[in-house]
Image (cartoon, grey):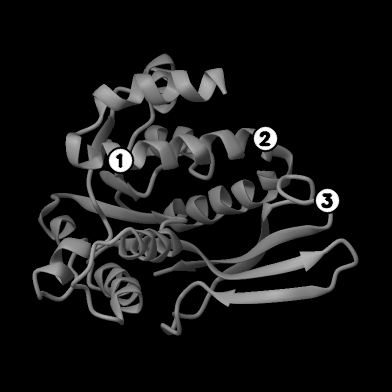
């Protein structure tokens, strides 16, 4: 708890005021990732391999953008920084622990941007979600990675609606998910989408007890790879159950 508190307190003044309320969620994720490092290792390795595959045959490697860069555990940051002139990491929150790690690595071509990538504000204003529209003005853009972000857009939207941010249409979550997919599809560069699409609750005997469509019925493009990710392994919250997500990688 002490490390979590220190990370929270160190991150808060580094984060723009509109996004400070999200710091605690990032710290909670950081804490869980540390506790579940062994269970998450396969997912993180698969995510990195998919990103490496996306950049492998690029003729130009000028600017790479990682959307939802988060803890960087699922991003091959060494490979990106070594191969691209500029690497832009975009997220609501960049934890102090992540900033310190980047500083120690002395990456000179990394840029951090705080940005809401959900499209919530567009939808609240009666516009079609276009949270990725800013990328169309980025010069020399050769690779965009959506790093295990898409399902979090839906989860975050539901959380905000449950917290009393009313006035949003009933189909807010699927519209935001579809907006992200459309935004990636309109970019004139290589893209790599990594996202968990389904949640399953499974007991220690392998019996499935519940299943949730994290994409809320929104159609997904054909996947290049798929794997499972024990987000909540046995022993994390229960000795009898685990929560396993199905993850896909889509490269275009």
Question: Closer to us: mark 1 or mark 2?
Answer: 1
- Residue 87, by quadrant, is top left
Does residue 118 appear left or right of residue 95 in this picture? left
Query: Is residue 243 something one can see in this rendering?
Result: yes
Which quarter of the image is occupied by the C terminus?
Answer: bottom left
Q: Could you say which is closer to the camera, residue 240 or residue 88?
A: 240
Provide the secondary structure element on which disc 1 rests: helix
Q: Whole-percent x and y of residue 157? A: 33, 63
What's the residue at 38%, 60% (across, down)? 159
Q: Residue at x 31, y 46 (%)?
A: 64
Q: Which mark is residue 21?
A: 1
Closer to the N terminus: mark 2 or mark 3?
2
Pick the residue in front: 70 or 203: 203
**What secondary structure is marked by label 2?**
helix
> How many marks can you see?
3
Q: Residues within 10 Å of mark 3 (few under 14, many from 20)?
A: few
* Label number found at residue 35: 2
Q: CA distance from mark 1 to mark 2?
A: 23 Å
Reading the chain from its start, which is encountered first: label 1 or label 2?
A: 1
Q: Tell me residue 45's x, y (percent).
A: 63, 47
Q: Residue furthest right?
A: 205
Give the number of the disc on residue 239. Answer: 3
């Amino acid at each position: 708890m002490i490390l979590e508190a220190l990370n929270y307190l160190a991150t808060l003044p580094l984060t723009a005021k509109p996004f400070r309320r999200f710091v605690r969620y990032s710290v909670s994720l950081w804490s869980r990732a540390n506790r579940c490092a062994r269970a998450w290792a396969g997912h993180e390795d698969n995510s990195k391999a998919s990103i490496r595959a996306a950049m492998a045959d690029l003729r130009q490697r000028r600017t790479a953008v990682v959307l939802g860069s988060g803890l960087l555990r699922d991003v091959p940051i060494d490979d990106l920084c070594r191969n691209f002139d500029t690497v832009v990491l975009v997220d609501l929150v960049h934890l102090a622990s992540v900033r310190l790690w980047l500083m120690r690595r002395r990456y000179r071509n990394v840029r951090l941007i705080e940005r809401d990538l959900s499209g919530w504000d567009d939808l609240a204003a009666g516009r079609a979600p276009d949270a990725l529209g800013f990328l169309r003005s980025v010069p020399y853009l050769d690779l965009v990675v959506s790093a295990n972000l898409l399902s979090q857009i839906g989860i975050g939207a539901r959380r905000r609606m449950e917290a009393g941010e009313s006035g949003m249409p009933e189909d807010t979550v699927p519209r935001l998910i579809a907006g992200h997919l459309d935004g990636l599809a309109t970019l004139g560069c290589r893209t790599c989408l990594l996202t968990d699409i389904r949640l399953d609750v499974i007991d220690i005997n392998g019996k499935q007890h519940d299943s949730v469509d994290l994409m809320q019925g929104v159609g997904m493009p054909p996947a290049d790879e798929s794997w499972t990710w024990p987000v909540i392994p046995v022993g994390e919250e229960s000795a009898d159950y685990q929560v396993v997500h199905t993850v896909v990688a889509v490269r275009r």
